[in-house]
Image (cartoon, rainbow, N blue to C red):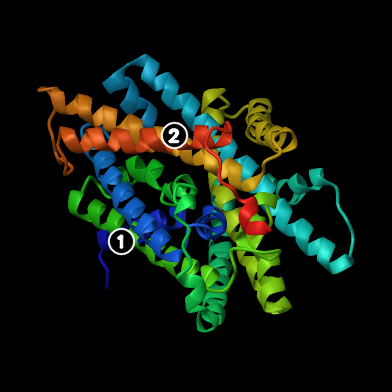
Amino acid sequence: MLSELDSKVFGGTLLIAGTSIGAAMLAMPILTGMFGFLGTLVIIICCWLFMYWMALIILEACLQFEEGVSFVTLAQDSLGNAAAGVTWVTFLLLFYSLLAAYLSGSGGIVVDALESLFNINLPPYFDIFPLLIIFAPFIYFGLSVVDRLNRYLMVGMFMSYSSIVAWLLPKISLEKLLYVDYSFSLLSFSVIVTSFGYHVIIPTLVTYLERDVRRIKSCLFYGSFIPLIIYILWETAILGILPVQGSNGLALAFKQDLPLARLLRIELGSDFIAALARGFSIIAIITSFLGVAQGLFDFLKDGVKAGASRKKQILAFVLTLVPPVMLVIFFEQGFITLLDYAGALIAIIMGIIPILIVWHLRKRKDRYVEYRAPGNNLALSLGLVFFGVLVLLVLLKNLGFLNFNIDVLIS
């Protein structure tokens, strides 16, 4: 029999894994395919190691404060009110960009399914409605309702993922896996970092595991290792099946924001695998949407001091959903670009700010250091450079200063 604490370690490991695995992995093959599988494998492993190190950095910071601290509290106590304000705004922008990406991504999949089944053309603004109408109301009724729904969805997501990978792996082409084009090597970094973005729950995990460093580190390692294996198998299956070039290629999917399910249906000529892919894609987006929306709703309820006030709760609910809906309506680039921006925000909130916090805390002599993450000032400096370059890459790409010649792969 597992002890209560060991049971918590198991639950914490699944919590880390569940927070990581989600909608971002739908964009990964589309972005990484143009670079190639082998190079992508190196990037995924490097990002996993780097984000695990960042988890240990955040753990070091959390253990120097009382239980129940948030990222805003860490920043305010260590770096001052201005840093706390930047942290708060960055969190808000991150939540909104992720929700907008999920609304856009789920709508694209549903629209693709309806148009192929009924041979109809639906207007672009229809994207926002499926997720908004069917699943957004669950957020209002609280975490207990969302948690019960999420458990069933996670089972469905695991079953559909396993079926897709088991179906595709025997059919993969070694030639496709050996494809490489170094000119696209920088295209996917931000979305891969987003796929390992579980760090926001570390303060909660510290309290949940009663500040037991050994068990917390175990959760962080194995909880992030599970997504690593899942992503590698996913990349192997998709990049070993789908071509990069041509009218059914990953390059066209990137340019036109096409769902993977459509590419798989055309390439394999199988409605069954297309249905599985759609099911997995939709569930992955729904579970991500529910978690992020619930977190933002609770964050905003606290911000407007809602308490038991029904009017303020409704206000917080409206503030949760209206801004991402506006982003989808007025921001035309769609799912992949929104995830790209989310990667830049994660680099700030889960990379740059925690490194600055720990750097400041290590200079103070009045702090009791319960745990110290590996790495000296040089390592912290390199971490700042890495995340700073990541933010710069996203800005340069989306402002048009860094261009990738996708059209060459399509024609």
Residue 256 rendering spot, x and y as whole percentages: 70, 51
Q: Is residue 83 above or below residue 228?
A: above
Outermost residue, bottom side? 170
Residue 140 is left or right of residue 32, and the answer is right
Q: Is residue 210 above or below residue 89?
A: below
- In the rendered structure, which disc, 2 or 1, sits on the residue that comes first in sequence? 1
The type of residue carrying mark 1 is Tyr
The image quadrant where one finds the N terminus is: bottom left
Q: Secondary structure at mark 1?
A: helix
Q: Indicate which disc residue 222 carries.
A: 1
Q: To which quarter of the image does residue 284 belong?
A: bottom right
Q: Nearer the viewer, residue 192 or 244?
A: 244
Gap in angstroms between the C-alphas marked 2 and 1: 28 Å
Camera-near label (2 vs 1) is: 2
Residue 100 is left or right of residue 387, and the answer is right
Q: Nearer the viewer, residue 209 or 30?
A: 30
Disc 2 target residue: 391
Q: To which quarter of the image does residue 388 belong?
A: top left
